[in-house]
Amino acid sequence: MRILIVEDDAALRKVLNKRIKEEGYAVDSYGDGIAALEYARAAEYDAMVLDVMLPGMDGFALLRSLRADGFGGGVLMLTARDTVEDRVAGLDLGADDYLTKPFAFQELSARLRALLRKSVQGRSPVLAVGELQMDTVRHSVNCGERQISLTAKEYALLEYLMRNAGQVLTRDQIYSHVWDYGSSFETNLVDAYIGYLRNKIDRGRDVKYLHTVRGFGYVLREEDERCAQ
């Protein structure tokens, strides 16, 4: 999942960037409304944390432009003014939720998770492909009776693959969704992390989940290698 933070308070923006990344999300953050609009149009985001008061373009104008462009991700607006007029204006423009400053990060995190669950159209929080299961609420992964321990980035990669199970994804698609702009790009980064997942999920099993489609990319599907021989 990839999140966009638009907040002009540099200290708060830095804290949010760090804490949300620690929860396994790819995060980009900007302090200017115009710059944020340009990047939001260039990348695919699942959700946005958007301050109302911004230089260049305020949060309301930014939200109006993004919704007009067809942005369908969840939007959590931040405001220092807890007025009915502000909330109504934001909700009418397409915001999904509001949070008044100051706030506890735990509450922001919970509201963000709720937005992301809504973005997948109310489907079960448990993703499953064969015996491979991911509980997106508890952030746990199991394959049959075996619990699989993943790093935050491995988890984010697996979640993206499972949400697109059966679909061939290119390296560029995977990189742009799982890694943020601040990540140092390496040509074999996606390949390396696919390898990490294979070692933890597929190694020693006849039934494999992570498959290379030569010349295209990768696909997650359940396939018994004995049947393919």
Image: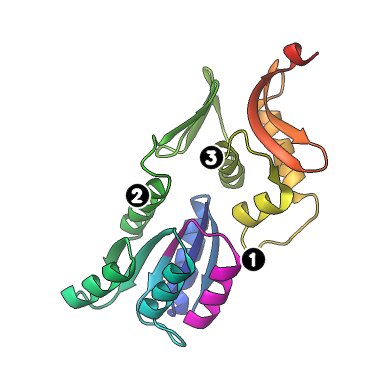
Q: Badge 1 is on which residue?
A: 182
Residue 114 numbered mark, or none: 2
Secondary structure, magenta segment, majority class: helix
At mark 1, the secondary structure is: loop
At mark 3, the secondary structure is: helix
Q: Position of residue 140 (x, y in %)?
A: 48, 34
- Where does the C terminus fall, quadrant-wise? top right
Based on the displayed image, in which of its 4 quarters is residue 94 positioned? bottom left
Residue 163 numbered mark, or none: 3
170 is within the stretch colored magenta: no
The amino acid on which the numbered mark 2 sits, given as a three-letter code, is Ala
Task: Tell me the magenta residue range.
Answer: 33-48
Residues under labels 3 and 1: Cα distance? 24 Å
Mark 3 surroundings within 10 Å by alpha-carbon count, few (fewer than 14), some (14 through 19), many (20 or more): some
Q: Position of residue 154 (x, y in %)?
A: 61, 42
Residue placed at 76% from the left, 43% from the top?
Answer: 191
